[in-house]
Amino acid sequence: MNEPRASVIGAASPGGAPRILVVEDESALGLMLSYNLESEGYVVDRVERGDEAELRLEESAPDLVILDWMLPGVSGLEICRRLRARETTRTLPVIMLTARGEEGERVRGLSVGADDYVVKPFSVPELMARVRALLRRARPERVAVKLTAGELELDRETRRVRRGAREVHLGPTEFRLLEYLMEKPGRVFARSQLLDSVWGLSAEIDERTVDVHIGRLRKALAKGDEVDPIRTVRGSGYSFDETFGRG
């Protein structure tokens, strides 16, 4: 009852939207995939080389990878093999794209750890359905329309937050901060992590800005003698209190 949970499945909003890495060396196909994924509400990063994909994956793991089999630099097959060998990416969902339709090649792709295998040319609606299915299984909290903890409810679709009968009025940044923290109750996020995930890697702002927005979020969430669901961990950062709403 008290940990954020999925109540309805649907595309998440920016800030807490699932991140998808598209690794495809055909520019036109990569652009088409990016356009359709972004239309579904996902945050998309796109690269055209296997070695570039390796660098992106080392920087920050996405929620799902769409990976072409044949790539310059490092093959998609080898990237998938390396992902499965690393503890941090062992369970990262991977959909492999290839022009190879023979059963033997399909088995080979799945044997190195791909979760799904799509042969070109493919139906875009079918691929989108496979993406949604994999995300539901792997990270249900990233595709839930609503996150709830105790009497606190965040609705990604309407962009509204309620605490019991009271509506909580948040600015766009405070909404994204709360959304991100509620996805992983109890996990402590450093200010730098929050900057990267909520503001974006390209944001040129000071880490103290996080403190300002956390202060605003707290003021909106906890009125009077209401319990503050945001926890400060001295020297480390902030987390959503996983015990919030218990008892």
Image (cartoon, grey):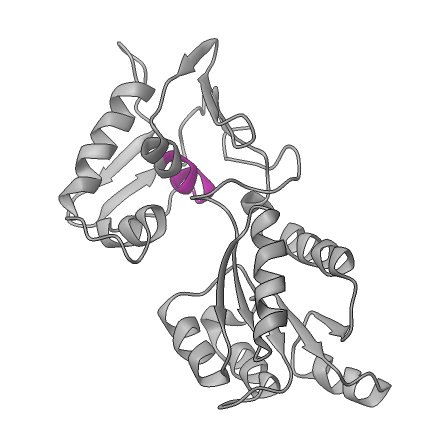
- Segment colored magenta: 178-184
Q: Residue furthest front?
A: 28
Q: Return the x and y of residue 112 as percentages of the image width and height.
A: 65, 83
Quarter assignment of residue 7 = top right
- Residue 146 magenta-drawn? no
* Quarter of the figure that contains the C terminus: top left
Total numbered labels: 0
* Quarter of the figure that contains the N terminus: top right
**Relative to 157, does residue 46 appear above or below in the rendering?**
below
**Relative to 6, does residue 136 appear above or below in the rendering?**
below
Q: Residue at x 57, y 60 (%)?
A: 34
Q: Return the x and y of residue 146 as percentages of the image width and height.
A: 56, 31
| Relative horizontal placement of residue 198, taking residue 106 as reference (left or right) | left
| Relative horizontal placement of residue 96, taking residue 178 as reference (left or right) | right
Q: Residue at x 54, y 46 (%)?
A: 142
In terms of depth relative to the viewer, which is nearer, 188 or 72? 72
Q: Return the x and y of residue 107 as percentages of the image width and height.
A: 78, 84
